[in-house]
Image (cartoon, rainbow, N blue to C red):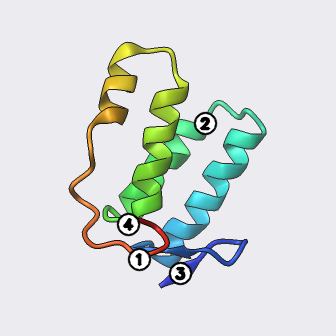
Amino acid sequence: MTADRHGQRMSHTGADALLRYEQAVDDLLFFRPRVLDTAKSVLAASPRSVMGHVFLAYLGVLGTEERDAAAARRPSSGTGPASTRTR
């Protein structure tokens, strides 16, 4: 199991996906327009990444598009079991 830069475990997230996740967080913090593409690349690298799914849902809630917010509300079933901390 990988861990982010703060030592938090990342369920079902490979090393490449972890790097992409960290980049997506930076993109969000610095208001970079590529944040959505970077976040999607996390799931391209690790489709079951729990935090990858959470991050995309968070971006959907932040947005103003009604369809994005609706998609963010739907639970993701593709992650599999998560660590106790992730749940």
Position of 22 with respect to 61 (left or right) is right
Which label lies toward us, 3 or 4? Answer: 3
Query: Which comes before the other along the chain, label 1 or label 2?
Result: 2
Q: Provide the secondary structure element on which disc 2 rests.
A: loop
Pick whichever, 56 or 46, lies toward us: 56
Can you identify the residue that label 3 sits on?
2
Which residue is drawn at the image coordinates 43% and 15% (left, top)? 65
Query: Which comes before the other along the chain, label 3 or label 1?
Result: 3
Q: CA separation, marks 3 and 1?
A: 12 Å
Which residue is drawn at the image coordinates 72% and 72% (left, top)? 6
Which residue is drawn at the image coordinates 68% and 78% (left, top)? 7
Amino acid at pointer 3: Thr
Identify the disc placed on residue 83.
1
Query: Which comes before the other along the chain, label 2 or label 4?
Result: 2
Amino acid at pointer 2: Arg
Q: Quadrant of the C terminus?
A: bottom left
| Label 3 packing within 10 angstroms: few (<14), some (14-19), many (20+) | some
Amino acid at pointer 4: Ser
Can you identify the residue that label 2 sits on?
34
Q: CA separation, marks 1 and 2?
A: 29 Å
Which label lies toward us, 4 or 1? Answer: 1
Q: CA separation, marks 2 and 3?
A: 24 Å
Q: Position of residue 70 (x, y in %)?
A: 31, 25
Q: Are marks 4 and 1 in contact (CB under 8 Å)?
A: no
